[in-house]
Amino acid sequence: MKKQDGIDFDFYRLLRDEMVPIIETTMMSVRQKINKNNRKFCMEIFGYDFMVDSELCPWLIEVNTNPCLEESNALLRQLVPRMLDDGFKLTLDLMFPPLPAAKIAEALGEEESALHTRN
């Protein structure tokens, strides 16, 4: 990706090589306080706010334990539902696996038949 001033900039490298280690360090620093009771299949969403300076160095501004999930622009309308869906796949789907499509169709067919029978 090119910055507006024409400098090549690889955001994914910045995220992988510099921001993720910061996130890992902050999570390690509070590991004794998160999920103290060692409950399985629970999740919490954290909002990490970074600023990138003119030297392309990321700076952690804050971490929110209750981040805003407002879909206030096109990018967030794409990312927020995907993030929530991924979070549910990592937690709820492990405890309550989704039904196969055939099972859903069968259940819907039975429901439809029951509606027609009542009328």
Image (cartoon, grey):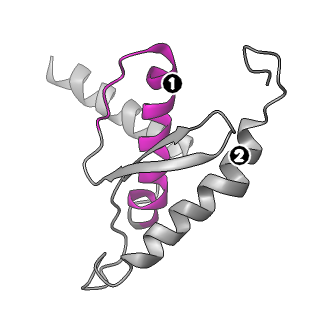
Of the residues shown, which amino acid type is indicated by label 2?
Leu
In the image, the segment drawn in magenta is: 68-94
Is disc 2 placed on a helix, strand or loop? helix
Q: CA distance from mark 1 to mark 2?
A: 22 Å
Asked whether residue 59 is in view, the answer is yes
Q: Could you tell me residue 50's position as x and y percent? A: 49, 43
Residue depicted at x 68% and y 39%: 56
Please tell me which residue lies in front, 11 or 42. Answer: 11
Q: Could you tell me residue 116's position as x and y percent? A: 25, 20
Is disc 1 placed on a helix, strand or loop? helix
Q: Indicate whether residue 4 is drawn in magenta.
A: no
Please tell me which residue lies in front, 98 or 61. Answer: 61
Residue depicted at x 66% and y 47%: 15
- Mark positioned earlier in the residue sequence (1 or 2): 2
The residue identified by callout 2 is 14
Please tell me which residue lies in front, 57 or 64. Answer: 57
Choose top left, top right, bottom left or bottom right for residue 81. Answer: top left
Of the residues shown, which amino acid type is indicated by label 1?
Gln
The residue identified by callout 1 is 78
Asked whether residue 98 is in view, the answer is no
Residue depicted at x 61% and y 58%: 20
Quadrant in which the C terminus is drawn: top left
Q: Residue furthest front?
A: 54
